[in-house]
Amino acid sequence: MKNYFDNHNKTDIIEYIKKLYYHDDRPWIVGYSGGKDSSTVVQLIFETLKELKSNGDKLHKPVNIIFADTLVENPMITNFIDDLLGQMQKEANELNLPLNVQKVYPDYKESFWTLLIGRGYPSPRQKFRWCTDRLKIRPTTRFIKKQLSEYNEVIVVLGVRKGESASRDQVLNNSKIDGKILRRHQSLNNAYILSPIENFTENDVWQYLLNSNEELNNNDFYSPFNTNNNTLYQLYRDSDAECPMTITKDTKACGNSRFGCWTCTVVKTDKSLRGFIDSGEEWLLPLLKYRKYIYDIRNIRDKREKKRRNGKVYTITKDGEEKIGLGPFTLEARKEMLQKLLETEKKVIMLNRKMNKHCLIKPEELKLIREEWIESGDIQDSLPEIYKNVYNEKLPWSYDEKFLFNQEEIDLLTELCEEENLDPELIKKLISIEENYIGYKYRHNIYNKIYKLLQQDWIHYDQIKNISTNLDVK
């Protein structure tokens, strides 16, 4: 593929974007991931709007720059992105440009930690990559739908390029409309995709970012909103991938990327965190160790349930033998993961005083995790004690402590269950159901919950106990 700038200059691409902007009244939603391609698109659009404004041309429709913050972004990148977005909005306001910069976030009920530690989802892998949809696609889709409700039609501008990968080219080809510049959005009606730099090569991207803008002292190259593109280039050193703005599930995992989740367990080796650490950012070492821990723990059978969250026991046939499959993490494993995560957070804060408490996990997530654990039968209400053990202080919000069994009471309950040949987990879950409905005026739903619990496969263990559980995890 030939370089765009072999036969064109920056004026050509600016004029092209001007024509696209004035083609209609549909607002633009520009996906920004922090990487080089989306940075090129954002800076070209910003430069175009600045030029139109300085020429006295009418800026007739809004441009929204959105960044999908997964809440598990690499802390190095989070700081970089926050500074950049703040400067971008500041410049846009001063120039009176119709440009709005905004972060979008996953619902806390669907955050990485709520699902992994709260509900026990197994660490993501290629065959069960539950994270991309919940952390990136859904927040972005919600924003687009909100714009659609107001404007009826929108144009999503992405920094995708032809020739990056076979999967990316396939997505571009599948959504193409014959004879049109815009492409169809794969899941949203009345949303269209615009890819202004699709004919750029990687060389074109870096030529624009490092050569096309104004060169100042010490080989610094500045964006149209006065951020240093050399900083972006430095972030890419020793990194062989980037994490694109994601609007479809076809996008590959980006655990090797500087602009991806530090928790990514889809890839075996995290080159991003290792690259930063090798560059001198040793305070990130606890994150690298924790990431390896949650990668390894999913393969330990004793840390996983023999049933799914709905209580169903599923089997697979391997080597001619029927074996029980793996379910979510056990409650004890989830407690262990939270303990280690909070210890990791504490170490990071000690190593880097710029980091604040809850830099790795938010209070809103801790609240939801506690609720999930209690529903799972944690009658001891373990989360407040785990938090206190790590930080030597109570949880930073008020909570009801009446639902609490001490260890002596739990031991007695377990002993009584064994004498009566009852499963302690079942009794704990029944107690949790009862406790959660104390004080409710209408209690008919409690019977539905009890009935649903008693129908679950794992309770009828005599029907499945002869199936092998010796299943290797890959």
Image (tube, rainbow, N blue to C red):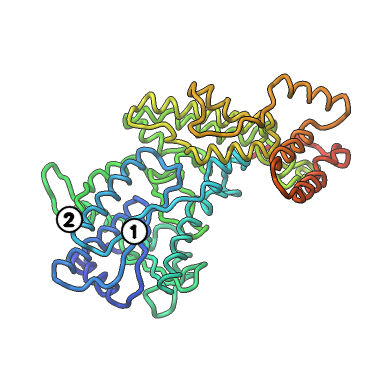
- Mark 1: which secondary structure? strand
What amino acid is at disc 1? Ile
Viewer-side label of 2, 1:
1
Numbered badge on residue 213: 2
- The residue sitting at the top extreme is 408
- Mark 2: which secondary structure? loop
What amino acid is at disc 2? Asn
**Of 470 and 244, the residue lying toward us:** 244
**Left or right: residue 52 compared with residue 295:** left
| Mark 1 lies on residue | 65
Numbered badge on residue 425: none
Tell me which label, 2 or 1, sits earlier in the chain: 1
What residue appears at the point 55 percent right and 36 percent down from the top-left corner? 295
Q: Quadrant of residue 102?
A: bottom left
Residue 383 in the image: state x and y as whole percent.
58, 30
Q: Are marks 2 and 1 in contact (CB under 8 Å)?
A: no
